[in-house]
Structure formats: structure tokens, C-alpha cells
Image (tube, rainbow, N blue to C red):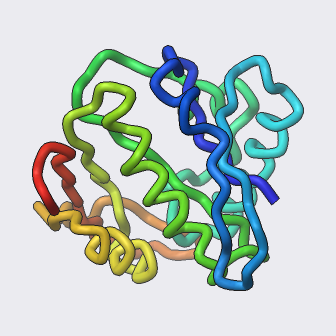
């Protein structure tokens, strides 16, 4: 099994640490590596997983599947900001194995190496208890709440979202 951290920016700072080898709660090994737009089979696989998460409808507010170009634009476009944002998805059949925590810890290692000073997760829906617990356990600060931030699958009710912040220069 592989977990992928994507970066189409200069990855020189990551070359010295990638691939990372980690172990799941089940003691199965995983490999964390990078992916770019030149990895079409892997990107197709990730595109499929993301659309499965949209179909599940409980953590991302998209109401329609993303086509391949929309997926690439969402996850493989970068800017020069010093505050980063990321999205994490774990396929349903691989949940509760510790994959989310490993991805989050890897993110905390990679982002400052890529020049980011802080990160904001600005749309963590309040029903996503696992994500909220994860960010808090890693020292993220809850900095706000967005009322009626989105509608999730099979619901007419708008759900609130929480915002989490992490400063890479502070001990969190």
C-alpha cells in the first residue's frame, strides 16, 4: 500500500527524506512518496478515490464528481503563498488503520521543508469527528467556525465547518 503526498513544486527539500516508510496500526508497512502530473496511472487512481469520497458525501461538499482536469486543478495547482492548505482522503476500506495520522504527520514534516510557515484547514465539517480529533491531537488550534458552510450528501441541512491553524515556527 502506498500513501501519496503530491507536490508539483520544486521537491529538492523532500528528496532527502522521500520515500518515507511507516507502519499502520495493523503492523502493515506503507510507503509515502511524491507524485506529479507525470504520474498518470497513480493520478487516475487518486482521482477515482476522491470521487468515491464525494459519493460517500460526508467530508467534502462537492455535489458532483470531478472530471480528471477538475481533480488535477484542485490538487496539483500551487501558488507562492506562505500559508498552505491540504486535503486528506482515506478510502473507505482503509479507514481506522492510522493512515490519516500518518498522512498528517508527514504533512507536518513536508510543508515547512517546502517553505510554508503555517497552514489552515478552513473547511473541516463538524460531523467529521475523526478529523477534528486528529488535528487537535497534533496541536492544531481551532480558530473559528463557519456557520452553514456546506451541504453534504442526502441532506438539505447546511452544516457548520471548523477552521484549524498550525504555525510551523511554534511548538504546538
* Total marks placed: 0
Quarter of the rendering occupied by the N terminus: bottom right
Q: Nearer the viewer, residue 119 or 23?
A: 23
**Residue at 19%, 54% in the rendered image:** 165
What x and y, as percent, mark residue 75?
56, 34
Question: Is residue 35 in sight in this rendering?
Answer: yes
149 versus 94 height, above or below: above
Give the residue furthest to the front.
16
85 versus 164 height, above or below: above
Is 84 left, or right, of 53 in this rendering? left
Question: Is residue 158 in sight in this rendering?
Answer: no
Is 135 left, or right, of 3 in this rendering? left
Q: Nearer the viewer, residue 143 or 94?
A: 94
Q: Nearer the viewer, residue 154 or 52?
A: 52
169 versus 8 height, above or below: below
32 versus 30 height, above or below: above
Is 159 left, or right, of 155 in this rendering? left
**Residue at 66%, 49% in the rendered image:** 32
Name the quadrant containing residue 27.
Answer: bottom right
**Residue at 61%, 68% in the rendered image:** 99
Quarter of the rendering occupied by the C terminus: bottom left
What x and y, as percent, mark residue 107?
44, 49
Q: Nearer the viewer, residue 108 or 37?
A: 108
Is 25 left, or right, of 26 in this rendering? left
**Residue at 51%, 18% in the rendered image:** 12
Give the residue furthest to the right.
41
What x and y, as percent, mark residue 33?
67, 40
Amino acid at each position: 500500500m502506498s500513501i501519496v503526498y503530491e507536490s508539483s513544486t520544486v521537491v529538492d527539500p523532500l528528496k532527502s527524506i522521500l520515500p518515507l516508510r511507516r507502519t499502520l496500526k495493523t503492523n502493515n508497512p506503507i510507503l509515502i512518496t511524491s507524485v506529479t502530473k507525470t504520474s498518470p496511472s497513480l493520478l487516475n487512481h487518486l482521482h477515482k478515490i476522491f470521487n468515491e469520497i464525494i459519493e460517500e458525501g460526508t467530508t467534502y461538499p462537492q455535489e458532483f464528481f470531478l472530471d480528471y482536469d477538475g481533480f488535477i486543478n484542485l490538487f496539483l495547482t500551487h501558488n507562492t503563498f506562505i500559508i498552505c492548505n491540504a486535503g486528506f482522503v482515506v478510502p473507505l476500506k482503509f479507514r481506522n488503520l492510522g493512515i490519516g495520522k500518518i498522512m498528517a504527520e508527514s504533512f507536518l514534516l513536508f510543508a515547512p521543508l517546502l517553505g510554508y510557515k503555517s497552514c489552515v484547514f478552513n473547511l473541516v465539517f463538524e460531523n467529521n469527528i475523526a478529523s477534528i480529533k486528529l488535528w487537535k491531537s497534533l496541536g492544531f488550534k481551532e480558530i473559528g467556525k463557519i456557520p452553514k458552510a456546506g451541504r453534504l450528501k442526502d441532506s438539505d441541512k447546511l452544516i457548520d465547518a471548523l477552521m484549524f491553524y498550525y504555525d510551523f515556527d511554534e511548538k504546538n
